[in-house]
Amino acid sequence: MTAPERATRTAEADALCVAAYDDNGGPETGAALVAVGGYGRGELAPHSDLDVVLVSDEGVDLGDLAEKVWYPLWDSGSKLDHSVRTLPEMIAAADADVRVASGLLDLRHLAGDPNLTLRLRTTMLAAWRRGARDRLPALHDMVRSRHRLIGELAHLSVPDLKEAEGGLRDATVLRGLVATWLVDVPHVDLERSRLALLDVRDLVQAMAGRATDRVTPEMWAELATALGLDDELSAQVHVRELGRRITHLSRLAWRRVDAVLARPVSVKGARRPSLEPLAPSVALSSGEVVLDRKARPADDPLLLLRAATAAAERDVVLAPATAARLVRECPPLPEPWPAEARQLLVRLLASGRSLLGVWETLEETGALSGFLPEWERVRMLPHASVIHRFTVDRHVIETCIEASALIRSVRRPDVLMVAALLHDIGKGGLTEHSVAGEPIARSIATRMGFEPECVDLIALLVRWHLLLAQTATTRDPDDPATVDLVTSRLGSVEAVALLGALTEADAKATSTKAWSSWRSGLVRDLARRAHAALDTGTALPPVLSDDVALPADFPAALKADGVYVSVEPAPDGSRVTTIAVDRIGLLADFAAMFALQRTGVRAARAWSQGDYGVSVWEVSEEHLDPAILRQKYDGIVAGRLDPSHRLRPTGDGLAPTVVVRPEASDHSTVLEVRTGDRPGVVYLVCAALARLDVEVRSAHVDTLGPQAVDVFYLQEPSAGVLSETRSAQAAHAVREALTGPG
C-alpha cells in the first residue's frame, strides 16, 4: 500500500460524498460537506471511516438533507463518522475542546459552498494560532497521558501504530504544533517517517481484513515480505525505527514549545538571540546548546562530546543542526582517547534522565558511529525476554540513567558508568551475550584510554553482570559454595561493590518486577556476604532476608497443632510466612495451599531451622486471609482436599528443564527446575520428591515473566547428599510430574 493507493481511495470516497450531496439537493451556498481527520488529510486506510461534517451558516434550514446524504454513503458499504453543525457551533466546539480544535486543522472541502469551507478553515486556523500559548499546555498533558497509557511504539511487543508514542497520532500533533508558528519541526524527516508508517498501517489493515492499528506477532513475517525486507527482525527494526524517529521529533518539538512558553511575549519585536557561554566553543541559545561564533569544529575532536555533555548536564536540547554539523566537521578522536574525552563521556552518561534526549539526538544525527561504532550491534535490537520494557539500546541507556543515581556508592564511578553502557554490547549474536560482550568491552575500554586495571574491571563486570542476580535468586545464600562462586568470579571487594550497583541499575531498567523488594534483598544479602568473605576472609553467620520477620516468641507462637501462618502487606501483593514441625512433604502441602487458592507465587524461600520448616512466600494477591489459607492447609493434611487431582500438569508449552547441579553445594544435592509459570509448579515438584522420601532442605523459587526458575536443595533423611542414582531418580520424577499426560 502506497501514497497513490491512498489517493485513489480518497478520490473514490470524495466522488461518493459529492454525489450523495449533489444528488440529494445539497445547496450551493450556505452549507457544505467537509472531510476532517485522516479523511481530511487524504489518508484513508483500507478500512478507515469516512469522517465528515455537514456544516451550515447560522439560520440555514437543511431540513432532512443530512439523512439523505448519509444513506447513500451507508448503502455503498462505507463506514461513516458523521455530524451536523452550524458554523458557530463548530467554532464553539473548537473553543471548548483542544482535541476538536486540533482535529479541525485538517478540514477539507468536499461539496457545497466552498466559501463557507474557506471561512471555517481560516477561522479555525486563526483561532488555533491566536490561542496557542493558552491551549498547548492542555494538549501536551493529553499527549503525555496517552503515552503513559499506551507506551512507546519502538518498544511495545504489540506496537500500536496510531496511539503509541511515536505513532501516527503524534505525527499529526506535530503538524498542529507547526501550524501555531511558535516552533518548527524538520518537515522532510517528519513526512518521510509519517508516510512510511502510513504504508505499514495500510498493510496491517489489509492483512487483518479490518480496521486495526496493532501489529500482532504473527503479522511480522508477512509484513516483512510485503515491505520487501529480509525477515521478521528486519520488519520490526523498520517499524520501530520509524516510531523512534517520530518520538525524537515529538520530544524535541515539545521541549521547544516549553521553552517558547517559558519566555515572556515580546512586544518590541524579535531580538537577536543571546548566547550564554557553557564550555569552550559551546553556548546556550533559546534553550538549545549551539556553537559559539568562535567555534572551529575541524580543530577540536572533543567538541561533539563537550556539547552533548553540556546539554545533558543542563537538561536542555542539543540542537540537531549543531550535532549534525559536528558530525560532519569534527575530526575523529585520537586513540587512545585523551583523558578529557573519557571524562566528558562519563559525565554525559552520569547526567541522569536528561541523558535520554541528548543520546537520541546523537543517534539520529549519526554521531554515535564516530566514537562508539559498536552501538550498531544493539541499535533497535528487540529483547528475547518479554520481561524487558525496551529494546536493547534503550535498555542500556535506562541502565546508565539508573546507575547515575548509584555513583556515590562506588569508588570508581567512571568504571560503573562505562560498564553500564557496555553490559549488553554482546547481544545480537549466537554466543551468550555476556561471553560475547567481554572482549568487545575490553576493546572499547582500551580505545577510551582506561588504564589496564580498569579495562580488566570493565570487562569483568560485562562478563559477570548477571552473576549476582542469577545466583541470589537460585542458590542458598547460607551455603558456603554460593559465596565461593561469587568471590571466585569477582576476586575483589571493589568488583563486588561495582557489580552490586550495576545489578541494581540493570534490574531497575528492565522492569519493576526485576527489582522487587524481595529480589533486591536477596541480591544485597549475597553481595554483603561476598564483600565480607573477600574483606575479612570469614563468612557471615546465616541470616534471613532483611524483609522476613519471624514471630518474636517463635517457636512458642505456633499453635498447639504446631502450625503458624501469617500474612503481611508487600509491594503489589502479600508476604506469607509459614512455620511447622519439619517433615518430608511439608513444603508440598504449603505450596498446594496457595495453588488451590489460585494465589500466584512470585518468589519464595524455604529452609529448615532446628526442628521446624520455615517458608516465606511473596504472592500476587492482596488482602489474603490467613484463616482461609489455614483451612486449605488443614484440608490438605487431613486428606479432605486432594491437590493431585486439581493441579495436574497440562502438558502444554515447552518441556520443562530439570538439571542436577553437583557444583552448587557440598552438603546438598541441588536440583534446578525451569518451566513455564503456572499454578502448582512448586507443589508438583515437592510432591514428587516427597514420594521418593527425599528431604527439601531449602527451596528458592523465582518467577520472572513467563518462566519459573526454582532451585531445591535436597538431602536423604539424616544422610546428606543424594547418590548419583538417587539424584537421577529425583530429576526423572520431577520431570515426569511437570510434563503431564501425553
Image: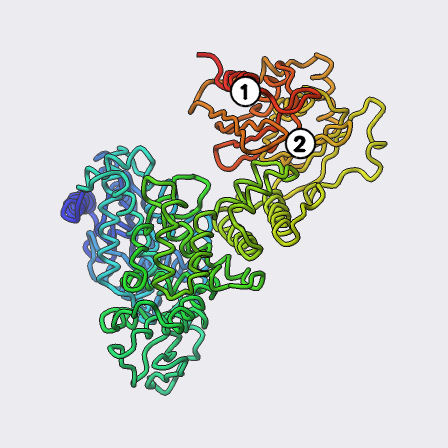
Location of mark 2 (residue): 606
Q: Which residue is mark 1?
A: 724
Q: Position of residue 683 (x, y in %)?
A: 60, 22
Q: Amino acid at mark 1?
A: Glu
Asked whether the viewer can see residue 120, the reply is no
Left or right for 234, reference 497: left
The residue that appears at 33% across and 54% down in the rendered structure is: 244
> In front: 301, or 329?
301
In the image, residue 24 sits, relative to residue 371, either above or below, namely above
| Residue 345, position as x, y percentages in the image | 40, 67
Q: Quadrant of residue 719?
A: top right
Per the image, label 2 sits on a secondary structure element best described as: strand
Q: Residue placed farthest to the front in the image?
A: 537
**Residue 280 in the image: above or below residue 70:** below
Mark positioned earlier in the residue sequence (2 or 1): 2
User: For the residue carrying disc 2, how many other residues have a C-alpha within 10 Å: few (<14), some (14-19), or many (20+)?
Assistant: many
Cα distance between the residues tagged 2 and 1: 24 Å
Callout 2 touching callout 1 (CB < 8 Å): no
